[in-house]
Image (spheres, coloured by chain):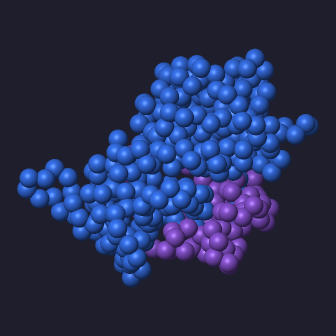
Amino acid sequence: VTSTVEHPLVPNLLPARTAAMTISTDAPATGATRPFGLTRATALAEGEGMVSIEGASYDPDRQLSVDPGGHPFVDALDVPHMPTSLDTQYDMTWVVDKD
Amino acid sequence: MTAPSVVVITQDRDITADLVVGELSRRGVGLIRFDLADFPENLTQIAYLVPGRTRWTGALRGIRRDVDLSAVRSIWYRKPSPFALHPDLTETEGQWAAAEAAMGFGGLLAGLDARWVSSPDRIALAGRKPFQLSAAASCGLTVPESLLTNDPLQARDFCRAHPEGVIYKPLTGGPGTENGHRVALRADTVSAGQITGGVRRTTHLFQVRVPCAYAVRLTVVGRRLFAARIDTPPGVEAVDWRAVHDQLTYTPIGVPDDVAAGIHALMDTFGLLYAAPDFVVDHDGRWHFHGDLNPNGQWAWINPLRQAITCALADELTQGRS
C-alpha cells in the first residue's frame, strides 16, 4: 500500500493517515546534527497513550463498530472515547493511530 | 429508497465517527461511509460531465452500497487512511496512481455541490501554524510573541529577552516513532542554555510562555461553540496538558464575546465548519491562542460535551448544501 504523493510546498489535498504504524529503528543523530526540536522528544512507555478497542469489529451494514454482542461499540459506558493526541498536527489519536 | 445524502469519509475503526453515524441513523438520515483506502480497488468511480450539465453526475459504487453523486448534500471529512493501491504496483506506478487518484477522485468530491465539514484542502491549509497565528492576530485573538527560525543565535536571544519563560512548540507534532520506540514530542519550556546548533536543521517555533490559570479546549461546529475548561490536579504542572491526559478534569464554560468573535472570524478566514482550538487562559482571565486550531481535532474525549457535540455535528451535516 502506497500513500499519496506529497510535495513540501503543495498542501496535501486529502490529509490522511495510515492505520498501522511501523516503529522506526532510526537511531538519533548526535550533537548539533540532531534537529533541536527532536532533542525534546521522549520515549513512551509500553502502552502509554494508547487506547484499546479490543472486541470491536466493523459492521459494514450499520457502518459502525459493534461489540461481540452486535451492539454499537460506542454505546458501552466504559468505551474509550479517544484521548486527544500526542501529535498536534491533526490532533488525531485513535486506536490505530498510536503516535 | 432515498439515496444517501450524507457522506462520511473516515477509517472503519474510527469509533468517534460512530457516535455521529449512530445519531444520523437515529434521525433516519441516509448516509454512506467509506474510507479513501477503499479506492481504487474496492470503490468504483463513474462520473460524467455531459453537455448541458454543470455538475458531475454518476456514482461511487462500493461493495455494499453506492453514492449517487447528485444526491450528496453533505460530506464529513474525518480521519481517512490513504488510498490503498494495488499491492503489485511498483513504487513509481504507485506514486503516479496515488497522485492521479488525489486529483481525479479528490477533485470530483471537491467539485460536488455539497456542504463539507470541513473541506480537506481547507483543513490542510488551516493546519499550518504560522498562518494560523498571523490570521488569529488579524482576527483579534490574543497571540503570544513568537519566533520562527532556524538560527540558533536568534533562538538564544529570544530566550534571554523573555526571562518570564519561553516554550518550544513543534509545528507538525512528533515523528511518532524513533529508535525502536513510540515517542512523544510536546510543547515544553526551553532556556537559552538548552538551545543547540540543531536549530539550524529546520524551522523551529518559540513562543513566550503565558502564565496559565487553566487551559480551554473549544470545539466549534458551524456557529456553535462548546468550551471545556481543562484543569490538572493540584501539584501537577504541565506546559502541555497532553502530558498528563489521564489526570485532567473538564468543566463546560462560556466563551468571552471577544474570543467568540475572533474565533468565528478565524473560521471564516479558513472556510472551516469545524475546528477544536486550544487556548491558555491567564490569571487575568485573558484567552491566548498559541496556534493550535486543530481543524480536524478530536472531540469525543471531552465527556461533558460529547453528546452535545455529537448532535451539533449531526445538525451541521443535515443542514443541506452550503
Taking the spot 64% from the left edge, 26% from the top edge, the residue there is: B255
Q: On the rendered structure, is A51 left or right of A93?
A: right
Residue B177, position in %: x, y?
A: 66, 61
Along the viewing direction, whichever of A52 and B61 lies nearer the viewer: B61
Q: On the rendered structure, is B151 left or right of A79?
A: left
Residue at the far right in the pictured view: B235
The chain whose colour is blue is B
Residue B170, position in %: x, y?
A: 62, 42
Residue B214 position (above or below residue B303): above
Residue at the far bottom in the pictured view: B88
Along the viewing direction, whichever of B64 and A84 lies nearer the viewer: B64
Taking the spot 62% from the left edge, 31% from the top edge, the residue there is: B290
Along the viewing direction, whichever of B135 and B66 lies nearer the viewer: B66
Residue at the far left in the pictured view: B51
Along the viewing direction, whichever of B60 and B142 lies nearer the viewer: B60
Q: On the rendered structure, is A2 left or right of B228?
A: left
Taking the spot 57% from the left edge, 73% from the top edge, the residue there is: A58
Residue B269 position (above or below residue B1): above
The chain whose colour is purple is A
Q: Is residue B176 visible?
A: no
Q: On the rendered structure, is B310 left or right of B280?
A: left
Taking the spot 78% from the left edge, 20% from the top edge, the residue there is: B283
Residue B215, position in %: x, y?
A: 73, 33
Residue A97, position in %: x, y?
A: 62, 62
Q: Is residue B318 visible?
A: yes
Which of the 4 image quadrants contains residue B42? bottom left
Quarter of the C terminus of chain B within the rendering: top left
